[in-house]
Image (cartoon, rainbow, N blue to C red):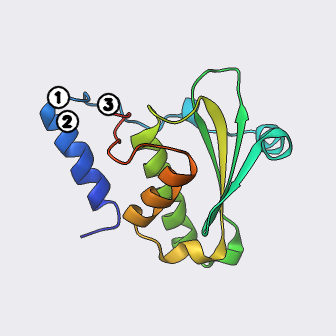
Amino acid sequence: MGPLSAASQHCRHLKEEGAISQGQARFTRADRLLQRADFLRVKQSGQNRHTRHFIISLAANEVHRPRLGVVVTKKLGKAVQRNRVKRLLREFFRLHKGVLPSADIVIIAKRQATGLTYTQVRAELAAALAVPENTGCMGD
């Protein structure tokens, strides 16, 4: 069972119940922070929340929907480990963007984040961002 299988099963269950439609829970270009200026604005003017494995910065935006920026440095390990952490963070955002605050969110991974499963990432980020436990796939 892969690290994203718990999220995939949860999402598949919601699709079968008709809670979400195909293509609704996507991570599009519009959902991402891409410009360095946006990352700097969020870091300088946003609220910071610290968890054991992540630093989360939130700042209001003009687009009135959540957008995600992920920072994973080479201190975390090789490319495979860094990419896995980024995939887990994007998966959490993709499945919960319907209940996240309408803000720009920058998540910085700490060194200990490499060994986490999706379930652990979901629990930690949900607590930090005040996301209800039983949500996912666009908040349904």
Q: Amino acid at mark 1?
A: Gly
Which secondary structure, mark 3? Answer: loop
Which of the two marks, 2 or 3, is nearer to us in this view? 2
Residue at (37% x, 34% y) in the render:
139
Viewer-side residue, 69 vs 28: 69
Residue indicated by mark 3 = 23
Screen quadrant of the C terminus? top left
Badge 3: few (under 14), some or many (20 or more) residues near its Cα, within 10 Å?
few
- The three-letter amino acid code for the residue at tag 3 is Gly
Q: Decide: few, some or many residues near mark 2? Use Cα within 10 Å; few <14, some 14-19, many ≥20.
A: some
* Camera-nearest label, 3 or 1: 1
Q: Which mark is residue 18?
A: 1
Along the polypeptide, which appears first: circle 3 or circle 1? 1
Amino acid type, callout 2: Lys
Instruction: Left or right? Give the position of 90 relative to 57.
Output: left
Which quarter of the image is occupied by the N terminus?
bottom left
Rendering quarter of residue 63:
top right
* Rendered location of residue 116, percent (x, y): 46, 72
